[in-house]
Amino acid sequence: MVELRPATELRRPPAEVRSIQYLRGFAAFGVLIYHAAERAGGHFGTGAAGVDVFFVISGFIMWVVTCGKPPSPGQFLIRRVQRIVPLYWGLTLLVVGVALAAPWIFPAMQVTAEAVVKSLFFVPYRDHTGLIAPLVIPGWTLNYEMFFYVLFAFGLMAPVRLRAWLVSAALVALVAIRPLGDVTNPVWATYTNPLLLEFGAGIWLGKAWAEDRLPGVRAGWALVFAGLIGFAVAGFSGIDVERARFLIWGLPALALVAGAVAIERNGTVPRLKPLQALGDASYSLYLVHGLAISAVVRLLDMAGLASPALILAGGLIAGVVAGLITYHLVEKPLMGLFKTGLGSRRTAHRSRPAAPVPPPAPTGNP
């Protein structure tokens, strides 16, 4: 039983949640392994669960950064745009430019005005293969993220005591009405997907963190191991995860994140620079890792060295290196420009939450 303290006796939460940053790196690397193994002819499906971890983290952070003196809905959305849009738009426009100038580099990509506009403005659509994904395929999760941010922004207009209930009720209602619409419609399929419930789970976890209602360190470790075991069991069982993803991957993701933050809320988490660096660069790593793996495969093919082992090892190394370089040379400078133009550095710094990382589309497409 978790001991509940009066608000005046609550322990002040740490200013920095290191465990969340480490989990971002963990999730991003899992997705990287998933795609590198796939290109090498192998399979590591559980790595794709990194996106579920990120959705829980996103809900957690949105609550934590707004539970004190909340920003206005407009301020909140501007901060989310500052975090998500610069790198994603830059990479999308770069890919479009390359695809138009040298189509042989992206032979499977069909660039149309509609595809570009919908990709940039987070509108789900099906490409020519039937996949619900933008031109930069990993951006499919950003469609979920931005939709959740809009819902959460509306929730900020409600009293704090009702906010979690109202946002959660909206998410549950959207999932509940899914059978009433056309699930072949990409917009309906995305915005009524049970994956949305993972954001809601993160909100309640963030609320428990802010109110110091998390279990102790031992229970935290038990939750971490339960989450990892849940992922392992799902991976080895060969079950069709997409039929009940929220349960099969979402619950272990919640357990893993809950356990990690419970451990930190009741103790200390050491500063581990490699994990910190990977967590910092997780958004960049997520967006560019597919391009890095493809470059490795192409180079190995040209050199006649395209063995599964070299593709896997080269893809992992290239993905991490490309993510770190992109973060330091592109993402950070772009965010700095947006922060300077859209708000004070102090305001922007307070809202520096996690962005998601992803794998195959929730429709089951790779």
Image: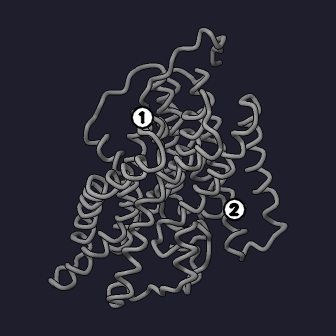
Vertical position of residue 55 compared to residue 45: above or below: above
Residue 247: in sight, yes or no? yes
Specify the amino acid type for callout 1.
Ser
What label sits on residue 80 in the rendered view? none
Position in image of residue 54 (x %, y %):
50, 49
How far across and how far down the image is residue 31, in percent?
Answer: 41, 59
Q: Of circles 1 and 2, which is in front?
A: 2
Helix or strand or loop: what does disc 1 sit on?
helix
Mark 1 or mark 2, which has the lower sequence index?
1
Q: Is residue 214 above or below residue 170?
A: above
Q: Quadrant of residue 205?
A: top right
Q: Residue at x 55, y 49 (%)?
A: 78
Q: According to the image, label 2 marks what residue?
A: 191
Q: Quadrant of the N terminus?
A: top right
Q: Is residue 24 left or right of residue 259?
A: left
Mark 1 and mark 2: Cα distance apart in space: 29 Å
The residue lying at 31 percent from left, 41 percent from top is: 275
- Residue 19, numbered circle: 1
Q: Is residue 276 above or below residue 120?
A: above
Q: Label 2, secondary structure: give it.
A: helix
Instruction: Determine contact: label 1, label 2, CB under 8 Å.
Output: no
Regarding residue 252, the answer to whether it shows in the image is no
Give 201 or 187, whichever is nearer the viewer. Answer: 187
Residue that sits furthest to the front in the current view: 341
Q: How many marks?
A: 2
Give x and y (percent) for residue 288. 35, 65
* In-front residue for pair 237/268: 268
Amino acid type, residue under disc 2 in the picture: Tyr
| Local crowd size for mark 1, using a 10 Å CA cut-off: few (<14), some (14–19), many (≥20) | many
Residue 310 image offset from top left, x and y in percent: 21, 70
The residue at the far right in this view is 180
